[in-house]
Amino acid sequence: MNLRLRHSLSHRLLGAAALTTALTLLSTGALAQSWPTRSVKLIVPAGAGAAPDVIARLLGERLSQAWGQGVVVDNRPGAGGIPGMSALARSSNDGYTLGFVPAAMGTITPLVYKNPQFNPDTDLTSVATIGTSPLVLVANASSGINTLQDLARFARANVGKANFAAPQPNSLPHLAGEMVNKVGNMGMTAVPYQAPPAALAGLLGGDVLMTTDGIPGLIGQIKSGRLKALAVTSAQRLPGLDIPTVAETYPGYEAIGWFQIIAPAGTPTAVIEKINADVNRIINAPDMVTRLNDMGVYPRADTPSVARDFFASQQKVMKKWVSDLGIQAQ
């Protein structure tokens, strides 16, 4: 093959590659501009009226307005979120089925169930982080326990009698309480309850010393004086709440709930980026920030790659917790 022919072929190949790249970019851009052309399903692995459902519906309403298409919330509660998460993992990766996923369903369920029916690493991809949602540890105000130090002293002085409420076994509040118990060497026994309201009733009834839950579910009882807030589980104190952190007593401790929009793996990048941009714009609008803060949620503005990194970091934390606590998959 002579030199002139080789140069001609090289130019043709480069031209073909450039054309392919240009067409791909054009088609990707066109996809992002045209999507969505029909309603979008938002799977929520929790029941109607639960915190994830309330926030998902609030976001879905705003996204419907932005997209000019309906956003239909599909509640799939039960079994640690497996019905919802597995349905999401099996959905078409065209952007028309998304998940509104709480921390526990994404990172704890795959660790504590032998057959979770989905693999977050291969079946799913993070699209956007709605926000973080710290927990709060509370005691009955009539107990005389006003600080974590009080709780630890009482528990150590009453070995075998001290206990705490675990709302929903293997939930994030349960594991957060177990870790406080462990790092504080308190020796308390976890008493399982089926749901946070039942755990709260047990605490108010004097059946347990302490429970842990999201701020929205407890703040009313804290403000009324029936509950004493011992600590929040975030790394820093929260604005507007004069409550110390667990880390102030036990350095390095942090446990945060969070919510993400998650899509089936393979969802087109252009669609993911559009959803991410629209979600970030909505959740960081001043009125939305206020509404989310009132529910104990603090918005973020993660790019898709940052959202994926955040998910991976939370997986790492939960794997260590489950290992440290000796929890066996059931």
Image (spheres, rainbow, N blue to C red):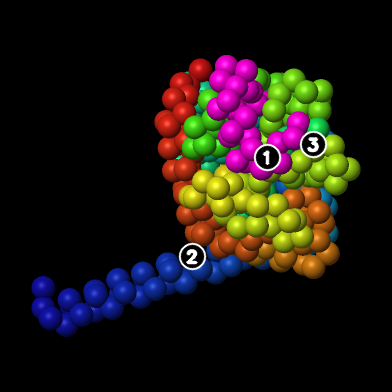
Element assignment for label 1 = strand
User: Quick one: quadrant of the N terminus?
Assistant: bottom left
For the point 78% across and 23% down, which residue is it? 206
Can see residue 32?
Answer: no
Q: Nearer the viewer, mark 1 or mark 2?
A: 1
Amino acid type assigned to the residue bearing label 3 in the image: Ala
From the image, tell me which residue sits under label 3: 141
What percent of the width, then of the height, locates residue 62?
81, 57
Lateral position of residue 96 relative to residue 322, left or right: right
Could you tell me if the residues under marks 3 and 1 are in contact, i.e. CB atoms within 8 Å?
Answer: no
**Which of marks 2 and 1 precedes in the sequence?**
2
The magenta region covers 143-165
From the image, tell me which residue sits under label 1: 137
For the point 35% across and 75% down, which residue is it? 15
From the image, tell me which residue sits under label 2: 24
- Alpha carbons under labels 3 and 1: distance apart: 12 Å
State yes or no: residue 158 in magenta.
yes
> Crowding at label 3, few (<14), some or many (≥20) Cα neighbours within 10 Å?
some
Lateral position of residue 8 relative to residue 282, left or right: left
Amino acid type assigned to the residue bearing label 1 in the image: Leu
> Crowding at label 1, few (<14), some or many (≥20) Cα neighbours within 10 Å?
many
Lateral position of residue 226 relative to residue 181, left or right: right
